[in-house]
Image (cartoon, grey):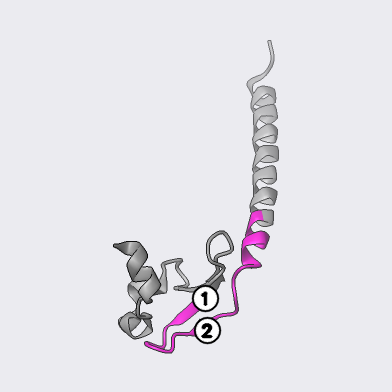
Amino acid sequence: MIPAAEILGNHVAKTLQDLHQQIEAAKLITQALLKHVGAPALCKGCGAQILFVRHTASSGKLTPYDPDGLNHFGTCPKAAQFKRPKTKEATQHAG
């Protein structure tokens, strides 16, 4: 019969190895994501600390985010002052 400590030892070693691999993968993903994040800045409307993130999958535009990951356009009390008027072309496509 195999002692329980030996079985658990192998299981723990395998679990730790898996965990280490997951951490290394997370590091690579984080490094790739951080290439799209700009330096911290202050919102010109409310003065809150924000980070600009470049969305490459869609328009490539920079979008402001709060440090907790929320889109700052949704949390800024002065967000309306940054809204751009819709262009005639965008209005025609919408309706």
Quadrant in which the C terminus appears: bottom left
Front residue of this view, candidates 40 and 6: 40
Q: Are marks 1 and 2 in contact (CB under 8 Å)?
A: yes
Stretch in magenta: 29-50
Q: Could you tell me which residue is drawn at 67 percent across and 49 percent down?
A: 25
Instruction: Give how far across and how far down residue 74 sits, in percent.
Output: 34, 71
Quickly name the residue at label 1: 51
Residue 5, above or below 60: above
Instruction: Give how far across and how far down residue 70 sits, in percent.
Output: 41, 67
Question: What is the crowding at mark 2: few (fewer than 14 residues within 10 Å), some, or many (at least 20)?
Answer: few
> Which label is found at residue 41?
2
Q: Could you tell me which residue is drawn at 53 percent across and 66 percent down?
A: 59
Query: Which one is earlier in the sequence, the residue at label 1 or at label 2?
Result: 2
Front residue of this view, candidates 5 and 45: 45
Residue 4, above or below 88: above
Instruction: Give how far across and how far down residue 73 sits, in percent.
Output: 38, 74
- What SS does tag 1 mark? strand
Residue type at mark 1: give it. Answer: Leu
Front residue of this view, candidates 10 and 58: 58
Residue 47 in the magenta stretch? The answer is yes
Q: Could you tell me which residue is drawn at 38 percent across and 88 percent down?
A: 45
Q: Looking at this rendering, what residue extends furthest in the top direction?
A: 1
- What SS does tag 2 mark? strand
